[in-house]
């Protein structure tokens, strides 16, 4: 009897062991064993023979890569919520299922957004450097490292999907007044937490903290620009854990250096990794992180396992639980 061929899955980075065990028990798995993303030319080569691709946000799965895929490529399983690195329209045309990993990173990312908020308000990183570099000479000074209060202040949440709503929950714990702006009203947030829907300009003008949780789309590219930053309070803090390109970094640098706003906490950047010479990194009132908002052991493991489960479902002919492009079912229907 002829043995059935084990399907081939190409993975663009090493995954947590639990996810790897699941995949290796069912497929022939090849992994790019480097922290730096694989070159695009290699991706194009691998999708030519692979049945499935598991990738990260930093992998450019554009039209050129998708066009290089062989007819056997069934699925692109992204280990992330966002998928703006994937040409979903082109994938759909070729009958390739695209999935993501929503939900599992909500609480962890919201925790980190609030961590940045607290650190930016109270100058935590600056204080840390102050002590470690030997600048602390006075036992206690009335105006030494003074920051902004968080308790009872106003938070403006831009985007109230899963993560933005979870940040609102944390804000309520700090007795904060909650403003929000989104393309749709969030009745549940209003009823549960007393959040108030306002237009974007009002949110920027009246909030002590502005935290961004929108996807990157043509309409959100540089949504926070010089004009918008000039609306904010001089004592306000801007937090971004969504996508770097939502904020115009040149305008933000100007705002921070000239004192239009108090500080910023940034986990995402226009270019990642950001250039070590990025002028934002030279400012004491910037808290900088390397896109790690979802980086807890438990969450990253759950993300990888979900990506593996999405892959298995597609390869077995089932509709995956987290299908991004439902239109693909018209092009290549599931078999089960």
Image (spheres, rainbow, N blue to C red):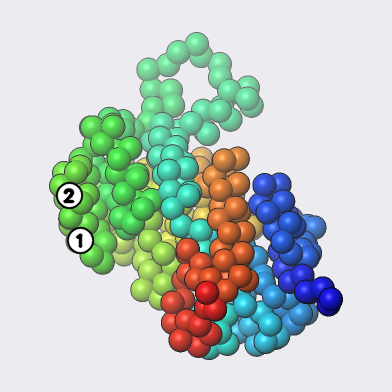
Q: Is mark 1 on a helix, strand or loop?
A: loop
Residue furthest front as drawn: 1
Give the quadrant of residue 97: bottom right
In x, y percent, where is residue 191? 15, 47
Q: Position of residue 269 (x, y in %)?
A: 53, 58
Q: Quarter of the image for the N terminus: give it.
A: bottom right
The image shows residue 207, relative to residue 306, as above or below, that is above
Query: Which residue is nearer to you in this view: 260 or 132?
Result: 132
Q: Mark 2 points at which residue?
A: 190
Q: In which quarter of the image is residue 173?
A: top left
Measured as percent of width and height from the top left, residue 88 is found at: 51, 78
Looking at the image, tell me whether mark 2 or mark 1 is earlier in sequence order: 1
Disc on res. 185? 1
Badge 1: how crowded within 10 Å, few (<14), some, or many (20+)?
some
Taking the image as shown, residue 305 lies to the left or right of residue 138, namely: right
Above/below status of 151 relative to 163:
above
- Disc 2 vs disc 1: Cβ atoms closer than 8 Å? yes
**Residue under the image location 83 percent in, 77 percent down:** 2
* Point 50% across, 11% down: residue: 139
Q: In this view, does 305 lie above or below 333?
A: above
- Give the residue displayed 43% in from the left and 23% down from the top: 144
CA gap between label 2 and label 1 equals 9 Å
Q: Where is residue 310 in the image (x, y as percent from the top left)?
A: 56, 63
């Amino acid at each position: 009897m002829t043995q059935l061929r084990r399907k081939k899955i190409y993975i663009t980075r090493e995954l947590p062991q639990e996810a790897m065990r699941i995949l290796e028990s069912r497929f022939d798995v090849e992994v790019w064993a480097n922290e730096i993303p694989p070159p695009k030319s290699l991706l194009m080569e691998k999708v030519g023979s692979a049945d499935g691709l598991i990738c990260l946000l930093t992998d450019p799965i554009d039209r050129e890569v998708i066009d290089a895929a062989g007819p056997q490529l069934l699925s692109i399983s992204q280990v992330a919520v966002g998928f703006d690195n994937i040409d979903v329209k082109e994938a759909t045309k070729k009958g390739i299922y695209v999935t993501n990993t929503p939900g599992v990173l909500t609480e962890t990312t919201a925790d980190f957004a609030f961590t940045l908020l607290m650190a930016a308000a109270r100058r935590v990183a600056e204080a840390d450097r102050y002590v470690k570099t030997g600048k602390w000479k006075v036992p206690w000074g009335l105006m030494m490292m003074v920051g902004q209060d968080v308790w009872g202040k106003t938070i403006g949440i831009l985007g109230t999907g899963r993560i933005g709503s979870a940040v609102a929950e944390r804000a309520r714990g700090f007795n904060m007044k909650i403003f929000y702006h989104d393309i749709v009203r969030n009745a549940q947030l209003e009823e549960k937490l007393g959040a108030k829907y306002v237009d974007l300009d009002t949110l920027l003008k009246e909030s002590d903290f502005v935290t961004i949780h929108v996807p990157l789309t043509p309409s959100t590219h540089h949504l926070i620009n010089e004009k918008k930053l000039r609306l904010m309070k001089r004592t306000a803090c801007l937090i971004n854990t969504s996508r770097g390109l939502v904020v115009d970094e040149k305008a933000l640098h100007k705002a921070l250096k000239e004192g239009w706003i108090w500080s910023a906490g940034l986990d995402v950047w226009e270019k990642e990794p950001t250039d070590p010479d990025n002028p934002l990194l030279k400012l004491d009132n910037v808290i900088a992180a390397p896109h790690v908002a979802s980086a807890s052991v438990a969450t990253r493991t759950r993300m990888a396992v979900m990506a593996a489960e999405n892959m298995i479902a597609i390869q077995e002919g089932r509709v995956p639980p987290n299908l991004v492009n439902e239109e693909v079912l018209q092009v290549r229907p599931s078999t089960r």
